[in-house]
Amino acid sequence: MNAGRPFAFHAGQAVPRRSVPALAFDEFREFAVGGVENGARLVALFGLPAAGDATQLLAILARDGEGLLTAATTEVGASYRSLTPDCPQAHWFEREIAEQSGVRPEGHPWLKPVRFHRPHCAARDAWSRPATLASKGFSVLGEGALIQALRPEAEGPECITSPAPNPQEKDRNVDPREETLRVPSLRGAPSPKTEKPDVGGMLPGVTDFFRVEGEEVHEVAVGPVHAGVIEPGHFRFQCHGERVFHLEISLGYQHRGIERALAGGPAARTMHYVETAAGDTTIGHASACCQALEALSGCSVPARAEAIRAIGLELERLANHTGDLGALAGDVGYLPTQSFCGRLRGDFLNMTALLCGNRFGRGLVRPGGAGFDLEPARAAELSARLDATMKDVAGAVGLLWETPSVLARFEDTGAVPRSTAEDLGLVGVAARGCGIERDARFDFPSGIYRLAQIPVSTWSSGDVFARAWVRWLEIQRSADFIREQLRSLPGGALRTECRTLAPESLVVSLVEGWRGEVCHAVLTDRRGHFERYKVVDPSFRNWMGLAMALRDQQISDFPLCNKSFNLSYCGHDL
Amino acid sequence: MELNWRPLIPPAAAFLLSPLLLGVINRTKALFAGRRGQPLLQLYFDIFKLLRKGATYSRTTTWVFRAGPVVGLAAVMAALALVPLGGLAATMPFAGDLLLFAYLLCLMRFFTVLAALDTGSAFEGMGASREVLFSALAEPALFLALAALARHSGSLSLSGMISGVGPGSWLTQGPALALVAAALGVVVLAENARIPVDDPNTHLELTMIHEVMVLDHGGPDLAFILYGSALKLWALLALLAGLVVPVRTGSAAADAAAAVGGMLLLAVGIGIVESSMARLRMTRVPKLLVGALALAALALVLVLRGGGRP
């Protein structure tokens, strides 16, 4: 580290791990808290096992205006002084650290698990939850067991307790939470009666919730099973009549252990794990992963592939934004836009299928390039379909802005003040709807976005209308961008080979998915394998924004507010 | 002795045809949405399907929960004995039957609300509180509208009020009748859980009013509820149709056909309203209902100033 210049690097740039300043904890805390106070943004904060019993914390800050990232590490023991009281952006990250690494942030105002799984290091638990299953003779196997099996030579601190194989256990590679749900008797335990397994605080939603006390205050619990065909999540409202005082969101039902499964890679499954981290952001997550892999292997992506990837990313945005506007119309009972946008979303998905054979873009983005080429004939058809569909979208969405009863529902509903959005570090449509010019395509451009920029679309009111309107602006700009790219599709190769990854390196990739900024932070070990693969979906940053948007709102407006954020459950739960 | 079938026509038509009204509304909405939509007779199929099913009851519920759908259906069926069909008088009209009519519908609602509260679910309790609040505001609008009609026709029975409205009344008392029709129209939408007050199609429990109260009912109970709702829609639309389609030929068949045709047209109208506007924010619904009350009050003033019968 140079003495005078602070350590800074670009998104999508691999830097040696030893160049990341290792600070004493107080300096580290000042780095993160002070940095955020000075306008930087915490894009990732996570722990990884260090020598002995210690945990290394890594904070990555983004300086949006300069397009630069800064990072610092520190080592902590079983606990440390929480950052959250001085830096609300760290709130969710610190809960995640406590859950994953078993390190307790002392003074954290609301220290609860975010996903309700066992810590990655089974020896430590921030809540001292009993390792019930282990004591009952079940092995505590983390989700990473599979990966451990795949790389038996893995070095570094052994963090997953892998007891000697028990011959009675046939399928050992199961999620521990799944084990808690199994009745012990099924697995040869003596008890013939169905004994309720002691889950020790490991079931999602089984926890204390913030409560408002008082006469006439009542609690409404919604989910995890919902009336619509949506993902599971639990919402706990503290209401006074129809008015919401407080909403607490409890997730974790979809935790599959993707981060742990990615460790040890890159492997044949890496891209598939990433593409399914959040199915509606397939291209966003795949782009972020490829950006990291390409930076680590030092390969340069051909311009043609960059353009095709960007077309895929913008088609993903078009499909989801159009679907969201239709769903928003549906939530206020406005039929025409709901029905038409439902179909038009399908048209956009079919365009993605035209590009790569899969409606969600699986297989399109591949390390070193794109999985599929776009011949002139298909490019022409894509262009024609885009024009036809955009005409219909303009008609269907236009109805929203022309119907006073719709605007009356959208305006002043679920408003998030700009200051709150900044404090929480919201990203994507939710941030731009508060007037914050924050767009990774603009602030941290990568690939073709370095050459062809898309203007940042913002609206200042912070309410449901703002989030809907920003979507509409982005739909138009994405369509223009795709048309422009199709007109001037660069020639040349489609894919180059990515060779081995640089060892002992850190790379942070930022991609503006349709929902917001997708951040992947990858640390490689001495052999050039992923030691830690950190995925931060935009939903992880924005769920708290939804909770704040509901303050003082009508509980009957919750579905509308929720839809205006349209956050991912699986992207959060990973 | 020859049996007089005429008074039995209005309830018979209601019992047979009321599920068709919802089919017409749904087909209209589908048309506007660019879809083909469900069959016109879907509600009949649903009801027959549900009647063949068993029911599940939560252990926390009591007899009140089971009584809700039965009492509700019985109340609305009894109310239909008081409702005329266009020029055809009701089965049992009597002076002041409008009060019995309104409170039979109230009884239906009362038991639906009790059954909802009996489940102890937060959702159902919320729905019940909304339903009670909004119906308390819709009731005065209904009464004032009926009072204006009573004054206009000089009759205190629903049959007399409706048969007292002829094509001539629209010429002399047009503005007042239009106001009454508008107020009744809002009451029809509010009482039957239609947009802009409620959204019958939504799956979002937190936004529901009527639907959320019946979430825990299934099987024959749900069939009773669906049939009861269809009958209630018929009862209120029959009054509105009798007012806005004042065809009085004297022939039972022609009068009934005109009234039923008018109701089907009104059902199309409801479908158009639902297709062309969003739901109101929950806090705005009372304003709409008070607006209906104001229209009805104005109608009454006009009728009083106009000196009653032309």
Image: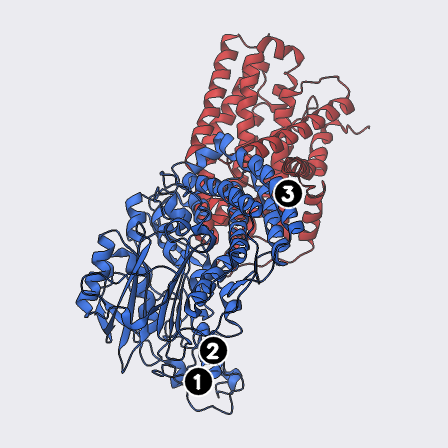
Chain colours: A blue, B red
The answer to which of A143 and B144 lies nearer the viewer is A143
Amino acid type of the residue that numbered disc 3 sits on in the rendered structure = Ala
> Is the C terminus of chain B in the top left, top right, bottom left or bottom right quadrant?
top right
What percent of the width, then of the height, locates residue B240? 61, 25
What percent of the width, then of the height, locates residue A125? 31, 76
Q: Which residue is mark 3?
A: A384
Element assignment for label 3: helix
Question: Could you tell me if residue B50 is visible in this image?
Answer: yes
What percent of the width, then of the height, locates residue A497? 52, 69
First in sequence: mark 2 vs mark 3: 2
Q: Which residue is mark 2?
A: A179
Identify the residue at the far front of this view.
A492
Element assignment for label 2: helix
Tell me: residue A505, above or below residue B17: below
Contact flag, marks 1 and 2 (Cβ < 8 Å): yes
Q: CA distance from mark 2 to mark 3?
A: 52 Å
Amino acid type of the residue that numbered disc 1 sits on in the rendered structure = Phe
Q: Which residue is mark 1?
A: A138
Question: Could you tell me if residue A112 is visible in this image?
Answer: no
Q: Residues within 10 Å of mark 3 (few under 14, many from 20)?
A: few
Amino acid type of the residue that numbered disc 2 sits on in the rendered structure = Glu
First in sequence: mark 1 vs mark 2: 1
The answer to which of B22 and A28 lies nearer the viewer is A28
The answer to which of A277 and A453 lies nearer the viewer is A453
What percent of the width, then of the height, locates residue A310? 51, 53
Circle 1 marks a residue in which chain?
A: A
Circle 2 marks a residue in which chain?
A: A
